[in-house]
Amino acid sequence: MKRLLLTLATALIAGPVLADIQDPPMNDYGPTRKLGRALSNLLWGISEIPTTMDRVNDLEGNSSAFSYGVVKGIGRSLFRVRAGVHELFTFPFPTERSSFRPPYKSNIPWIHGGYEEYPPELGFQTRKQYVTLSTNH
């Protein structure tokens, strides 16, 4: 009887542990996603310029948007191209902390300096959650 109870208790404890191992959190990131992110950064990284100009315009006005916003947008665009080239050549290998995550920090709303995983979408509608079109941070 004790063995039966011990076996049942072990099965109850081990069951959830095995369930977590079957689909780990890093499973969402892999070489295919890294290659897609690289191509996206190379092709659409230029969209950082008008998006950054729009954000700076909302925060600081027109003069800042057409001076500081352009310069900051070009810098962000060049960073995306560099990250895209890096990820294009290293997509089969887990390079960022032994994972396939992006090599840049995420967009933290109160710093205004991070990057979303993919370049911003242009236009007034979006159906994806990884891009923030609103500048009300």
Image (tube, rainbow, N blue to C red):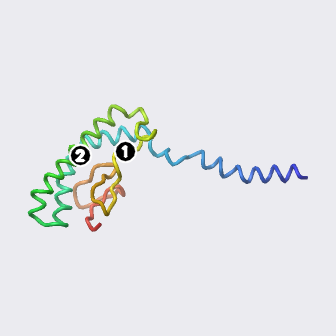
Q: Is residue 93 left or right of residue 104?
A: right
Give the left or right position of residue 66, taking residue 54 as reference: left
- Which marked residue is nearer to the observer: mark 2 or mark 1? 1
Displayed quadrant of residue 50: bottom left
Q: Amino acid at mark 2?
A: Gly
**Amino acid beneath label 1:** Pro
* Disc number placed over residue 45 in the picture, else none: 2
Question: Is disc 2 in contact with disc 1, using a CB cutoff of under 8 Å?
Answer: no
Front position in the image: 34 or 111: 111
Q: Position of residue 99 (x, y in %)?
A: 45, 40
Up/down of 74 relative to 82, above or below: below
Query: Mark 1: few, some, or many residues within 10 Å (few <14, many ≥20)?
Result: many
How many circles with numbers are drawn on the protein? 2
Q: Nearer the viewer, residue 124 or 88?
A: 88
Q: Is residue 96 above or below residue 6?
A: above
Q: Earlier in the sequence, mark 2 or mark 1?
A: 2
Q: Residue at x 24, y 41 (%)?
A: 81
Residue at disc 2, secondary structure: helix
Q: Residue at x 63, y 49 (%)?
A: 19
User: Secondary structure beneath disc 1?
Assistant: loop
